[in-house]
Image (spheres, helix red, strand yellow):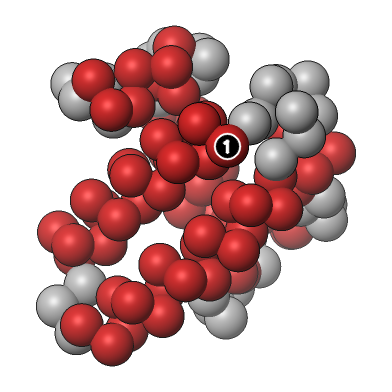
Amino acid sequence: MSTVPEAAELYAIHPQPLDAIRQKFFEFLSGWLGGPSLFEEKYGHPRLRMRHMPFAVDQQMRDQWMFCMDKALAEVVEDKLLRQGLSHSLAQLASHMINR
């Protein structure tokens, strides 16, 4: 995210360094994907829209986030159908975050 111009605005709104955000995202994805509910155990229900309301999430920001997610999925998920399914589900989640 830090090196690609396609995600420059998205990167700019995240506090640096990204270590804490990466950890929280890992914890969220663990539960979201059916594993241990690490995020909920630490922080309570994700309430994603509420947590993202302070940030201007528009279609462009959503697309930048999806660019990053699709890039990550391409790097770590070999199975094409699984990758497509995850991308579709993440896109629905990202669209739900739009608040501007």
Q: How many badges with numbers are in the image?
A: 1
Residue 59 visible in image: yes
Front-lying residue, 10 or 39: 10
Q: On the image, which quarter does residue 73 sit in?
A: bottom left
Front-lying residue, 43 or 76: 76
Residue at the image point whose x is 57% and y is 37% from the top? 59
Q: Mark 1 points at which residue?
A: 59
Q: On the image, which quarter does residue 79 sit in?
A: bottom left
Task: Look at the picture and state if 12 lies above or below 60.
Answer: above
Residue 64 x, y percent position in the rendering: 41, 35
Relative horizontal placement of residue 61, taking residue 43 as reference (left or right): left
* Label 1: element kind: helix
Task: Look at the picture and state if 76 lies above or below 67.
Answer: below
Front-lying residue, 66 or 52: 66
Residue at the image point whose x is 50% and y is 18% from the top? 14
Look at label 1 and name its amino acid.
Gln
Q: Quadrant of the C terminus?
A: top right
Residue 47 x, y percent position in the rendering: 82, 50
Relative horizontal placement of residue 68, taking residue 58 as reference (left or right): left
Q: For label 1, count other residues whose C-alpha is less than 10 Å away and answer few (under 14), some (14-19) or many (20+).
A: some
Relative horizontal placement of residue 96, taking residue 85 as reference (left or right): right
Residue 53 x, y percent position in the rendering: 80, 29
Residue 52 x, y percent position in the rendering: 73, 33
Task: Look at the picture and state if 48 lies above or below 93.
Answer: above
Residue 29 visible in image: no
Q: Quadrant of the N terminus?
A: top left
Residue at the image point whose x is 70% and y is 21% from the top? 55
